[in-house]
Image (cartoon, rainbow, N blue to C red):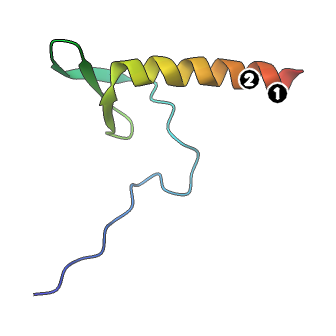
Amino acid sequence: MSSKPFSHPQNAGKQPCKHPRVQIVSREEDAEFVECLECREIFESSELKDMSIEESTEGEAQES
């Protein structure tokens, strides 16, 4: 039996997803996990906040 090579996500090679729509998939004592409804990536909700902060600081730097 041969194994299949790892398939890349559909958005490989494109701009990274900005996760405009997410839904909560799990909650634990100190963490909340969300899934992006666009690219289906699952991550901690605090990471989404960090991404938006980084995006806003990068945008300000490019405008200068």
Which of the 4 image quadrants contains residue 53? Answer: top right
Circle 2 sits on which residue? 59
Residue neighbourhood size for the residue with mark 1, other residues' Cα within 10 Å, grouped as few (<14), some (14–19), many (≥20): few
Residue shown at 24%/17% (left/top)?
A: 31
Q: Is residue 43 left or right of residue 62?
A: left
Residue 39 badge: none
Q: Is residue 63 left or right of residue 31?
A: right
In three-dimensional space, the C-alpha distance between marks 2 and 1, rounded to whole angstroms, equals 5 Å
Asked if marks 2 and 1 touch (Cβ < 8 Å), the reply is yes
Determine whether the residue tagged by mark 1 lies in a helix, strand or loop.
helix
Residue 29, position in %: x, y? Answer: 15, 12
Determine whether the residue tagged by mark 2 lies in a helix, strand or loop.
helix
In the rendered image, the quadrant that contains the C terminus is top right
User: Amino acid under label 2?
Assistant: Gly
**Residue most toward the left?**
1
Residue shown at 71%/26% (left/top)?
A: 58
Residue 16, visible in the rendered structure:
yes
Q: Is residue 63 left or right of residue 37?
A: right
User: Amino acid under label 1?
Assistant: Gln
In the rendered image, the quadrant that contains the N terminus is bottom left
Residue 15, position in %: x, y? Answer: 58, 45
Which of the 4 image quadrants contains residue 30? Answer: top left
Circle 1 sits on which residue? 62
Residue shown at 80%/23% (left/top)?
A: 61
**Residue most toward the right?**
64
Residue 35, position in %: x, y? Answer: 29, 30
